[in-house]
Amino acid sequence: MAGRGKLIAVIGDEDTVTGFLLGGIGELNKNRHPNFLVVEKDTTINEIEDTFRQFLNGDDIGIILINQYIAEMVRHALDAHQRSIPAVLEIPSKEHPYDAAKDSILRRARGMFTAEDPPYSQAAPPQACPQSFCEF
């Protein structure tokens, strides 16, 4: 992969994966394994987890997109992932809307802020500039 960037991998339902494949993300690695998994009714949790771990350990993957309802099936594996690359992003599907309360990354990001750090909207308002600087 000299001279090439990292790939986006997708784990999702047929509609989600098809959309990303039409967008051009489909690739095969040197072992002829695809960078996507279509999860169907007969796909086992072990298959999902094994594919997720392969994507995590692949040096050619930079981002893993996973439908949130599928992420729920392997939540323990997502929660155990601590590295920044590959980034794991939970996305909605046509049948299952996004729920921010279930998103591991968002929960971790919220945990980085303490109660002493007020949200931006509650921060002190900016001071008015001195009259001599504000005149044009």
Image (cartoon, grey):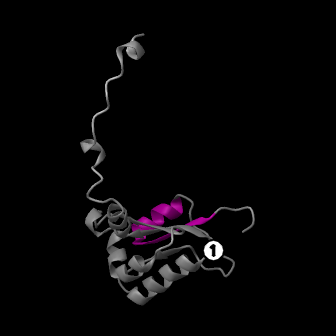
Vertical order, 126 against 38 (above or below): above
**Element type where label 1 sits in the image:** loop
Q: Nearer the viewer, residue 63 or 21?
A: 63
Q: Vertically, is 115 above or below 32?
A: above
Q: Position of residue 121 (x, y in %)?
A: 26, 42
- Whether residue 92 is visible to the viewer of this picture, yes or no, is no
* Other-residue count near label 1 (Cα within 10 Å), few / some / many at <14 / 14–19 / ≥20: few
Q: Is residue 15 left or right of residue 53?
A: left
Residue at left offset 69%, top offset 78%: 30
Which residue, as the protein is rendered here, is positioned at the far right?
A: 2
Image location of residue 108, percent across then percent down: 36, 67
Q: Is residue 39 left or right of residue 29?
A: left
Residue 31 occupies quadrant: bottom right
The residue positioned 70% from the left and 62% from the top of the image is 4
Considering the image in quadrants, where does the C terminus appear?
Answer: top left
Give the camera-side residue of 135 and 8. 135
Judging by the rendered image, the residue that carries numbered circle 1 is 59
Task: Locate residue 51, reporting x and y percent.
Answer: 50, 82
Q: Is residue 16 magenta?
A: yes
Identify the magenta region.
6-22
**Three-letter code, disc 1:** Asp
Residue 9 magenta-drawn? yes
**Point 46% across, 61% down: residue:** 19
Image quadrant containing the N terminus = bottom right
In the image, 107 versus 29, the foreground residue is 107
Q: Residue at x 32, y 73 (%)?
A: 69
